Amino acid sequence: MVILGWDDDYSRHLFKTEPESDGAFICMNSWGTEFGDYGVFYVSYCDTKIGKSAVAYSVIEGTDNYDHIYQNDEKGWIGRMGYDSETAFLANVYRAEGDENLRAVSFYATDKDTEYAVYVCRDYESSGDLATRRELCARGGFENMGYYTVELDSPVSLDRGEKFAVIVEINTPGSKHPVAIEMNAEDGRSGSVVLEGHESYISADGRFWNNTQEEAAGNVCLKAFTSDR
């Protein structure tokens, strides 16, 4: 369900079960225009569930900012992985579809005050390259938890057919499992997660890496964005 807005003056008398006070959130879901007022409906401020587990989108970029997106996690953040530590490394391996410039990556900060470092490994051959051949491309931090897109300090040139890895070192204070992963939640939320053909890794120290498809039947939530050269 999406909260589109709010109306402080929406009368409590308009609800079938009258709440204690006026005011309502303006909402929409997937039930179509036949439901509510052409798909729009109101939920009282007094409702005990509304917004209890919610995500706010404060910045939405245009759909023409990059030419290609590489991702393993089409369903997004479902679970977490880590090593009982605030720090962990995550990586995804992709193959360039054309002559492109890698310009940005995106991933989740699973809690506030998260710090990160983004690396790229070109001409990837094996998981050992994640430790020995990565190059730092961006560094920074996020005040709040959420999903973020990080532009690289400089574009990284990729050749058609080249395998490359995007790697993130992440530190989330107080967390024991700071890495967001896509996995089968077995509660109807995730559906079928595709593992075949994907290559994702996590590491405690950036030296020794575990394949998440094999270890946890999941994909690391780490996307790459490119533009044609």
Image (cartoon, grey):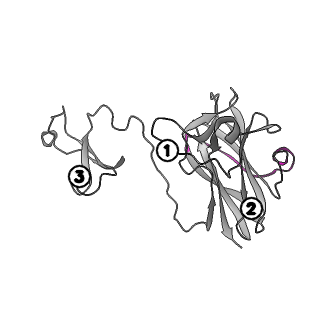
Q: Amino acid at mark 3?
A: Phe
**Above/below status of 194 relative to 50:** below
Q: Residue 26 location in percent, x, y?
A: 28, 48
Find disc 3 in the rendering and name its residue: 35
Whether tag 1 and tag 3 are in contact, CB under 8 A, the answer is no
Give, as a single range, the part of the protein colored magenta: 129-146
- Asked if the magenta segment contains residue 54, the reply would be no
Q: Is residue 33 left or right of residue 18?
A: right
Secondary structure of the residue carrying tag 2 is strand
* Outermost right residue: 132
Q: CA distance from mark 2 to mark 1?
A: 37 Å
> What residue is rendered at 67% in x and 32% in y?
82
Q: Front-most of 23 and 39?
A: 39
Find disc 1 in the rendering and name its residue: 191
Q: Residue 112 location in percent, x, y?
A: 57, 36
Whether tag 2 and tag 1 are in contact, CB under 8 A, the answer is no
Q: Residues within 10 Å of mark 1 (few under 14, many from 20)?
A: few
Q: N-terminal of the two: label 2 or label 3?
A: 3
Q: N-terminal of the two: label 1 or label 3?
A: 3
Q: Front-most of 105 and 127?
A: 127
Q: Front-most of 185 and 45?
A: 185
* Outermost left residue: 13
Find disc 2 in the rendering and name its residue: 154
Q: Residues within 10 Å of mark 3 (few under 14, many from 20)?
A: few
Secondary structure of the residue carrying tag 3 is loop
Q: Residues within 10 Å of mark 2 (few under 14, many from 20)?
A: few
